[in-house]
Image (cartoon, grey):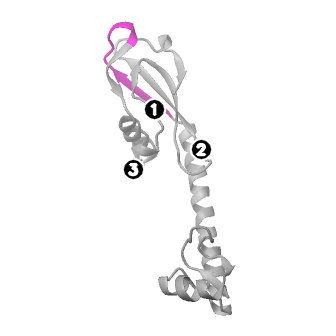
């Protein structure tokens, strides 16, 4: 029996795939639960059209993410904070601070969860912070943290 999957089925296949299953499995499990429909020419054509539309949408969103990645890579975010002994900050620069400044620089609202900062920045320096936009697209933004009184030449460069 040929069926077209309308939902992902574990150990069988993903949505939109055409599968050949036994009659009992299809009639007694897949069809009543709504996991699949009988594979008619019309159903197969509709599934192909849905998959093509999904592919176009994902390509468009990937292009948008790549354009945004290029803009992010060109940015340098500057933070100024009070500094104590050994160039340590009073407080820290967190992913929320970076997201807020990044969003203001890009003119969009930016989600702090996309910023891969393992721990908050607690010292003066220049840091390369990776940002996860989409699968395989991870630009880095340069974050410069300076003290209120420190000259810019004294900062160290590090990768986060």
Number of numbered markers: 3
Q: Secondary structure at mark 2?
A: helix
Q: Nearer the viewer, residue 117 or 81?
A: 117
Q: Which mark is residue 70?
A: 2
Residue 73, quarter of the rendered image: top right
The relative height of residue 160 versus residue 110 in the rendered view (above or below) is above
Q: Earlier in the sequence, mark 2 or mark 1?
A: 2
Q: Position of residue 85 (x, y in %)?
A: 34, 7
Q: Secondary structure at mark 3?
A: loop
Crowd around label 2: few <14 · some 14–19 · many ≥20 (10 Å): few
Residue at left offset 51%, top offset 15%: 156
Relative to 142, 42 lies left or right: right
Magenta stretch: give its range.
Answer: 76-87
- Residue designated by label 3: 109
Q: Earlier in the sequence, mark 2 or mark 3?
A: 2
Assess whether mark 3 and mark 1 are in contact (beta carbons under 8 angstroms). no
Q: Secondary structure at mark 1?
A: loop
- Residue designated by label 1: 118
């Amino acid at each position: 029996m040929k069926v077209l999957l309308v939902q992902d089925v574990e150990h069988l296949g993903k949505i939109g795939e055409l599968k050949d299953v036994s009659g009992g499995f299809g009639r007694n499990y897949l069809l009543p639960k709504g996991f699949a429909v009988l594979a008619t020419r019309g159903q197969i054509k509709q599934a192909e059209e849905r998959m093509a539309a999904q592919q176009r949408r994902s390509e468009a969103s990937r292009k948008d993410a790549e354009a945004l990645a290029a803009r992010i890579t060109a940015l340098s975010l500057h933070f100024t904070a009070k500094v104590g002994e050994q160039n340590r900050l009073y407080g820290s620069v967190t992913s929320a601070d970076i997201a807020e400044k990044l969003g203001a620089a890009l003119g969009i609202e930016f989600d702090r969860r996309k910023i891969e900062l393992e721990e908050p920045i607690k010292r003066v320096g220049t840091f390369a912070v990776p940002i996860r936009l989409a699968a395989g697209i991870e630009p880095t933004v340069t974050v410069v943290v300076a003290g209120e009184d420190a000259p810019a030449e004294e900062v160290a460069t590090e990768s986060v």
